[in-house]
Amino acid sequence: MQNQLMEILQEAKEQLKNAASMDATEELRIRFLGKKGRLTEILRSMGSLNEEDRKALGKQANDVRSEIEKLLEEKFLEMKLVQRAAKFKAEKIDVTEPGTVISLGTKHPITITIEEISRVFMNMGYQIAEGPEVETVFNNFDALNAGPNHPARDFSDTFYISEQILLRTQTSPVQIRTLMQQQPPIKVISPGRCFRCDTPDATHSPMFHQVEGLAVDEGISMADLKGTLSEFAREMFGSKVRTKFRPHHFPFTEPSAEVDVSCFKCGGSGCRVCKGSGWIEILGCGMVHPNVLKIGNVDTERFSGFAFGMGVERIAMLKYEIDDIRLFYENDMRFIQQFK
């Protein structure tokens, strides 16, 4: 049996030396040391030997087992290194190859315009105020001095959720919320989305964006309104732009006006952008109606204020010479990427 043990050890050395994979090495472990392995068979046959021979053979068998286990451990380690090297080779990256171009996004032109408008007014000391897009009829119409017979309250113009709840048609309700929540002095702008029952075409959309402004304090006059909006126009469209105020009517301001700017493309001489008139309408404004101030419990004998509102899409279309409002909402990346 001693000779058999030495033969097993020698055979294990030779076969492990030639093993070329992890699986082949595992098969050799089972063949020599497994429950039905060759070394195990010899150990089981030791029961027929006398005590002295069994003791000597047992020691030699343990030595052989230890030697084979050591060889197996070295072989397994070698195979792991071989596998790792093969994996690294397979996963090797050629850093000299051109990489995949990652397309970077850009801000939407509506976002760019809102941020630019907000920046101009924030530099004048205005704060941003926000309100819900789902509003009450009271905040959207009644509190803004728009009576029950006002045409904008018709079902053909406004999206009603219930008799008293609607999708806001303007961001002016934020002005009411601000008046009801804080006392003057107040200087806020309120950018946001609005909704009206318009059929989509080149100049209309059922969803659009507005920026409203409100300033309330002691001694505010129409001169303050004109100075504020003239400065806004110069910051937005260029230092040479002039403004013109035309009388108009809004239920929540008195007096009211429409504001035109001299065409920033032709300088007022007449072109396609201004339709030959030399002037471009950009927003509506006026002195806040006393009835609106009273809703916020503002003392109209002591305080006065002005308000203004502009369509963000209109400003963006004028500034970037976009001729169709629907382009803003089609998510065509060829259009949006032009604003990088």
Image (tube, rainbow, N blue to C red):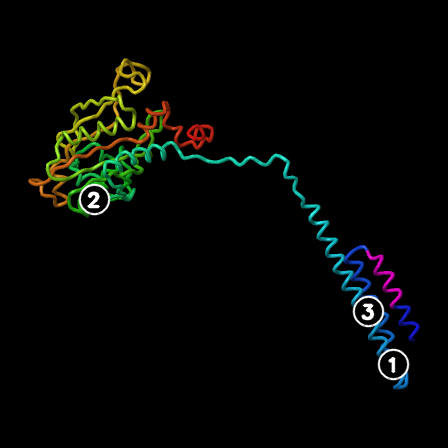
Residue 98 relative to residue 201: left or right: right
Q: Is residue 169 found inside the magenta-colored segment of the image?
A: no
User: Which of the pair 26/130 is nearer the observer?
Assistant: 26
Q: Is residue 283 left or right of residue 301?
A: right
The residue beneath circle 1 is 56
Q: Earlier in the sequence, mark 1 or mark 3?
A: 1
Tell me which numbered mark, 2 or 3, is placed earlier along the sequence: 3
Residue pointed to by mark 2: 178
Q: Which residue is mark 3?
A: 67
As measured in the structure, the alpha-carbon distance from the residue carrying label 2 to the one carrying label 1 is 100 Å
The residue under the point 89% across, 66% down is 10
Q: Position of residue 292 (x, y in %)?
A: 14, 39
Quarter-wise, where is residue 63 in the image?
bottom right
* Front-most of residues 215 and 207: 215
Whether residue 324 sits left or right of residue 48 in the image: it is left
**Is 197 drawn above or below residue 30 in the view shown?**
above
Q: Secondary structure at mark 3?
A: helix
Question: Between residues 104 and 52, which one lies in front from this camera angle?
Answer: 52
Query: What amino acid type should be assigned to the residue bearing mark 3?
Result: Glu
The residue furthest left is: 301
Q: Quadrant of residue 67?
A: bottom right
Q: Looking at the rendering, in which quadrant would you find the C terminus?
A: top left
Looking at the rendering, the stretch of residues picked out in magenta corresponds to 9-19
Query: How many other residues sit within 10 Å of disc 1, few (<14), some (14-19) or many (≥20)?
Result: few
Is 339 above or below relative to 79?
above
Viewer-nearest of labels 2 and 1? 1
Q: Quadrant of the N terminus?
A: bottom right
Vertically, is 323 above or below 296? above
Q: Amino acid at mark 1?
A: Ala
